[in-house]
Amino acid sequence: MKIGLTGGIGCGKSTVVKLFADAGWKTIESDAVVRGILSDSEVVQAALRAHWGEIVFLSTGEVDRKAIAAIVFRDDAELIWLETLLHPLVRAEWSNQLAAEPEHDWLVEIPLLFEKRLETEFDLTVCVISSPDVVEARMVCRGYTGAEVEQRRLRQMPLQEKAQRADRVISNTGSLEFLKRQTIRLIAEIQA
Ligand code: ADP
């Protein structure tokens, strides 16, 4: 079984990923794949240097992800350039991992699953939803401003539309315990 997991920013996707991992599933998170590519790929680092110069590198030589975020979140053209560079590499990474162990159960978290029309790659799609005010409160606790959360949300397909496209929806407006119960029940149903 291959599941594509999506949902809005701060809706609880990573929390659901951990619950699947606890249940023995192999899991991949897009953000972690991006972090790996930025830190390991000399080709990508060379492209970043050619495009933006040293401002997107720390004095240690590592890629400065905060500097990149600051650039792409105020300029759509820069975001498109970065996505065009990274998305094929991210997709190749999870595709290869899944192909290497096709018998295993996999959960791949992809925030832009529907926007990038990747749903056909999976047996089942799951969307984690929550309400904007709950998400904002949780993300502010994580150090984001309300404006930053809103800016990121506006770049995605409306959450309601994602939920309508998904095979299954997990609602994360209550406690963590409630989220856990729903996810464990979903895993049991899928495995039955
Ligand atoms: P996403 O991966 O979708 O961005 P996360 O799973 O990282 O979202 O959740 C965002 C933040 O909200 C995290 O700090 C997480 O611990 C917290 N969180 C998620 N679900 C709940 C919940 N039901 N109650 C309280 N905090 C939650």
Image: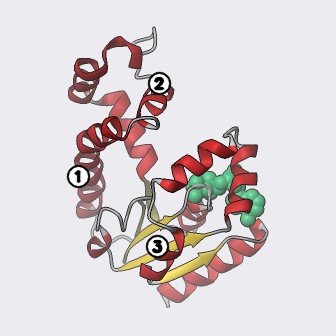
Q: In the rendered view, how is the structure colored?
A: secondary structure
The reply to whether residue 14 is visible in this rendering is no
Residue tagged 2 = 67
Left-right relation of 148 to 191? right
User: Considering depth in this image, is 147 or 4 the residue closer to the camera?
Assistant: 147
Indicate the position of residue 50 as horizontal and vertical percent values.
22, 19
* Residue at left offset 60%, top offset 65%: 19
- Amino acid carrying label 2: it is Ala
Residue tagged 3 = 162
Left-right relation of 8 to 105? right
- Amino acid carrying label 1: it is Ala
Vertical relation: 150 (above or below) 72: below
Ligand 1 quadrant?
bottom right
Please state which of the two labelled residues, at mark 1 or mark 2, is closer to the viewer.
2
Label drawn at residue 92: 1
Image-quadrant location for residue 35: top left
* Mark 1 vs mark 3, CA separation in Å: 23 Å
Image-quadrant location for residue 41: top left
Contact, mark 2 vs mark 3 (Cβ under 8 Å): no
Q: Secondary structure at mark 2?
A: helix
User: Considering depth in this image, is 5 or 163 the residue closer to the camera?
Assistant: 163
In terms of sequence position, does the residue under pointer 1 or pointer 2 come before the other?
A: 2
- Amino acid carrying label 3: it is Lys
In terms of sequence position, does the residue under pointer 2 or pointer 3 come before the other?
A: 2
Q: Secondary structure at mark 3?
A: helix
